[in-house]
Amino acid sequence: MIHSARLKFDIRTYWHAGTGRGRGGTVDAVTYKDADGLPRLPGRTVKGLVRDAVAQAEELNWFAEDGELKDLSPGITDRLFGKASEEQGKSEPGCLRFSDAVLPEDVRRWFRGNPKERGLISGLYRTHFATAVNDKGSAVDQTLRGIEVTVPVTLYATVSLVPDAGDLGPWTKVLERALPLIHAVGAHRTRGFGRVCVSLELDP
């Protein structure tokens, strides 16, 4: 049985993975970064995106209609990702765990090994400004907002089975079947941010 795989996030537009924090007087929302200042997509966000896709696919009966996967449905979403318990404040853990989605290791290693080139990191980010507009098409006073966004990049996350997960059968095929349902990542997806193509890569 396969115990781990890689998720590839081919992000094709500016995107924003929020932190809930701002910076100074011009940027109201900065994006999530690692200790080196490089962009990351938090593992909890990765898990949430994949869970939503699998749940949608299960609701559409995609797995029940697939001869190889029909024995895993119904209930595969809760089994893989966990579910809320009937007892308030508790939950039942799932069988999958997810890392942050990060730039390829060779890119991150290059930046760590070339501290004089760290100035290039700023080129990965832009500031996007937006303001509210009234019904006459004029900007509303004091609504200008600056958001830090990241340029299109390709990120990779690891998805793996927790110890003693048991036999989940072709769980990677469940993910592969559902991943096309993920169309965007991060905040402001309805405004065209974070358009993405997600795929699964198995270890050779």
Image (spheres, rainbow, N blue to C red):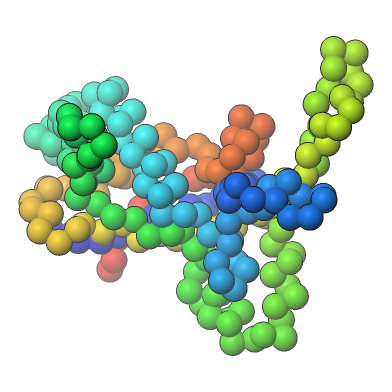
**Residue at 8% from the left image edge and 51% from the top image edge:** 167
Which quarter of the picture shows residue 50? top left
**Residue at 15% from the left image edge and 61% from the top image edge:** 163
**Residue at 58% from the left image edge and 62% from the top image edge:** 33
Q: Nearer the viewer, residue 71 or 55?
A: 55
**In the picture provided, is 59 more to the left or to the right than 27?**
left
Q: Residue furthest front?
A: 88
Q: Residue furthest top?
A: 135
Q: Position of residue 178 (x, y in %)?
A: 33, 37
Residue 22 position (above or below residue 72): below
Give the quadrant of the N terminus. Answer: bottom left
Q: Report whether residue 67 is seen.
A: no
Q: Position of residue 12 (x, y in %)?
A: 61, 48
Q: Nearer the viewer, residue 161 or 2?
A: 161
**In the picture provided, is 151 more to the left or to the right than 99?**
right
Q: Position of residue 52 (x, y in %)?
A: 37, 35
